[in-house]
Amino acid sequence: MTHATMPDRPRPTVVPGRIPVAPVRRPLPASADRYLRTLSEAVAAETVAAVTVRDDIVRVADRQGVAVVVAAQTVLEDTGTWPAVSRFRLLNYLKAGLVDVRAAAEHSWQAEPLRPGGQDLHILTLQRETGRLLAAAMLRRPAARTGARMADRDRPTLLVEEIFGVGVYDCVPEVSALRLDQVAEIKRLVRDQDLRGMAALRVTLETIMAACLAPHYAWDLSIQAWLGDLEPDVLGELLSFLHVRVHLVDVHPSPASAGTEAHYLSQHFAAGRARPFLMWSTENGPMDRRCAQVGAVLTFPDRDAAKALAALAASPAAEQESR
């Protein structure tokens, strides 16, 4: 295991935190182009406003017209908004180049081809006035029989293990010793790929902070380790800016990757840049303080918020806190 190699402070060009959009290298067939246009129109017409009036959600933030809530899978199903969330994620994975447009069109996917988990929690970042979805992420707690541990081989497979192999965290004895109900995954972090500038940065920060603060609200607060995968060059410096202690496992996607997750995101993982990560709930002190600072800055209008974020990034005191 290696610790994430991140610069002491984000470079100004990284602060916007824009998720890169992979260019389409070949013209799309007419059928794929029609498919993408139809999917885009469907997403543009949808809203998740019905979720925001529920009493059984966690309200994380509401700043400058951008609200962040956390809702259980059952809430999305009860409100009929689950298809909209799944369709939003598919469309923006396609726009980001993480899913093959031709394959999606060939299969006529109208939403992600993945089965939701019964305990899934969904982070929804949305436009407060309209309920239009701007970004999303998923927290998944694996279904576990009583007493099952990460070291067991007859336990349910995690999503990250479908890509990197079962036992990818065996190199971290502290993780192997955990019960399965003490771990959770952070997955499906994606935002509207058409956002630009400060609007994109605001939405990205709000969504990532909500995911990083999950130990304070998720399930019964018993999660000790948060697992998943990320591309260090894409999110590494932004996580460093938020003082998130991320531990990377230096392995590449398994050539024998199998399962729906591997098939769906095969174009993304084929690049070989993603790495499994680990975050400990006990290491969130500096991150909590930084997120409070950033949250206060995000109450400002865009122009003032951008200046304040740049000042935070350049602060020697903040740099010392992140170490």
Image: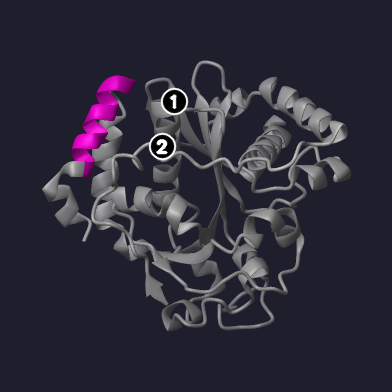
Disc 2 crowd rating (10 Å Cα; few below 14, some 14-19, many 20+) is many
Image position, residue 275 (x, y; %)? 51, 65
Question: Which of the two residues, 150 or 221, is positioned nearer the viewer here?
Answer: 150
Residue 281: assigned label:
none
Q: What stretch is highlighted in magenta?
A: 301-313
Q: Do the residues labelled 1 and 2 touch (CB within 8 Å)?
A: yes
Q: Residue furthest left?
A: 317
Which percent across, then down, holds residue 147? 58, 78
**Label drawn at residue 206:** 2
Q: In which quarter of the image is residue 166?
A: bottom right
Picture quarter with the N terminus: bottom left
Q: Distance between the residues labelled 1 and 2?
A: 8 Å
Residue 171 visible in the current orientation: yes
For marks 1 and 2 on the same chain, the one whose residue lies earlier in the sequence: 1
Q: Quadrant of residue 61?
A: top left
Query: Looking at numbered disc 1 in the image, what kind of residue is underneath it?
Result: Val
Q: Quadrant of residue 161?
A: bottom right
Task: Return the residue at label 1.
Answer: 66
On whether residue 201 falls in the magenta region, the answer is: no
Judged from the image, the secondary structure of the residue bearing numbered disc 1 is: strand
Left or right of 76 on screen, residue 285: left
Q: Position of residue 292 (x, y in %)?
A: 26, 41
Position of 161 relative to 315 (above/below): below
Image coordinates for residue 180, horizontal then vertical, percent: 56, 72
Color style of the picture:
one colour
| Residue drawn at (41%, 40%) of the image | 17
Q: Is residue 27 left or right of residue 188?
A: right
Numbered marks: total: 2
